[in-house]
Image: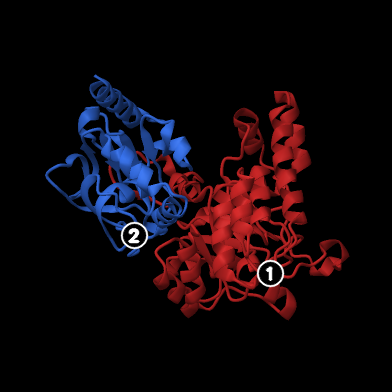
Amino acid sequence: MASDKTGSNGHEPHTGGVRVKRGLAEMLKGGVIMDVVTPEQAKIAEDAGAVAVMALERVPSDIRRDGGVARMSDVSLINEIIAAVTIPVMAKARIGHFVEAQVLQSLGVDYIDESEVLTPADEEHHIDKWQFDVPFVCGARDLGEALRRIGEGAAMIRTKGEAGTGNVVEAVRHMRAVQGGIRRIASMRPEELMAEAKHLGAPFDLVQEIHSTGKLPVVNFSAGGIATPADAALMMQLGCDGNFVGSGIFKSTNPEAYAKAIVAATTYYDRPDVIADVSAGLGKAMPGLDVASMPAGELLATRGW
Amino acid sequence: MRTPAELDDVDALVLPGGESTTMSRLLQVFGLEAPLRERLAGGMPTLSTCAGLILMSREVLDGRPDQIALGILDVSVRRNGYGRQVESFEADIPVVPLGVAPFRAVFIRAPLIEQAGADAEVIASFGSNPVAVAQGPHIGLCFHPEMTDDSRLHQLFLDRAAAALEVSAA
């Protein structure tokens, strides 16, 4: 089956094509997508100006603390969150768990996050995302990983960072890796592209596309460790298109205020006066973890390839 | 355009897609609503698409009670009236001022124009509902003309904006 379903040119309405999938992510650019575990939290996120919410069972810092197997959220909970808000609702499926993704699509979620925050269901293969009408966002630590996911049909990328730590260092590392990889390809001579595709483990046609356009073909948000308005603005100044904020909002001492401040800092990311203003009197940010001292087995970003 | 000073610098404005509730909140919190209403009252031309159309409308159904309807376009719109993302679609649609060749229109969680009043000229429909309206210096679209390479609607906006600005300058 052709991977790009936009090829049709009839008068019949055509759903599930690349343009509408990538297009929704375009509409979220410049915004904040917030992790929520209840309909009440979803309302708080919407009230604060979130462009979408991510429905999940536990925020990453709780998944990290509790251990065990983290799966797709409870179906009733997702339904309640969909009913509670008018903005798009995203939900997480385990890496490679295409049946969780089928279920989420049938519930009518607007985007699926094939996420390393949940326990992977397949350590070799990600979901074949071309088979779905619902669009997917996937995590990536560098350009090669981003292009492999786009090759599998992801319509949006987020850099992984290290979820649930409140530590922005991995988000910065991954965003710099993706942006640096793009600049490197853009500066190459055409005959160097195949070797670069081999080096990255990335589809050749996507490497060629980046060489000619100088950018990813899909929107790229940052994620994994954003805990303050300044963190959110940092990621925007590093060139991301928007922010996912997980534990950073509902593990702070004042979620309403943090949510509003992070939305404002993402919009006015180049205005330190605004960031200062919205950061005043916020209360305590979520507690942070030192990623460098964590055992390798506790890192979520290394799940998936 | 994110500040009153940036608004001062423009002659005509595109109100793009996005989440209308988010835009509405940022307009209110960062002091843009009043200056924007003032410029619109002064005849600033606009092209509004999707969420932008919702902001420009007279009435919003299924929105949030506190969301802004600027009341410039004489239309009543239903937020997400075409359904959720899996129902987002594209289709070839004839647009009256563009002549015979249809326009590939991309609808993403699009608003539905339930009713267009006498002041809004319907320039395109899909099924029984209007999807594009023109009213004085303003064009409002349910779909996203920027998602394809076809720039005819942008050109139409520029032509109409230039004509409107020439009249107001004279």
Mark identifier at residue B83: 2
> Could you say which chain is coloured blue in the image?
B
As rendered, which of A72 and A220 lies closer to the eye?
A220
Q: Kindly identify the amino acid type of the residue bearing the numbered disc 1.
A: Lys
Q: Residue B154 location in percent, x, y?
A: 35, 30
Q: Does B123 sit left or right of A113 as displayed?
A: left
Can you say whether A9 is above or below A129 in the image?
A: above
The residue that appears at 34% across and 58% down in the rendered structure is B80
> Could you say which chain is coloured red in the image?
A
Q: Residue A21 location in percent, x, y?
A: 47, 50
Q: Is residue B62 visible?
A: yes
Query: Which image quadrant: the C terminus of chain B?
Result: top left
Which chain's residue wears label 2? B
Residue on which disc 1 sits:
A284
Q: Does B134 sit left or right of A69 as displayed?
A: left
Can you say whether A139 is above or below B14 in the image?
A: below
Which chain's residue wears label 1? A
Q: Is residue B104 visible?
A: no
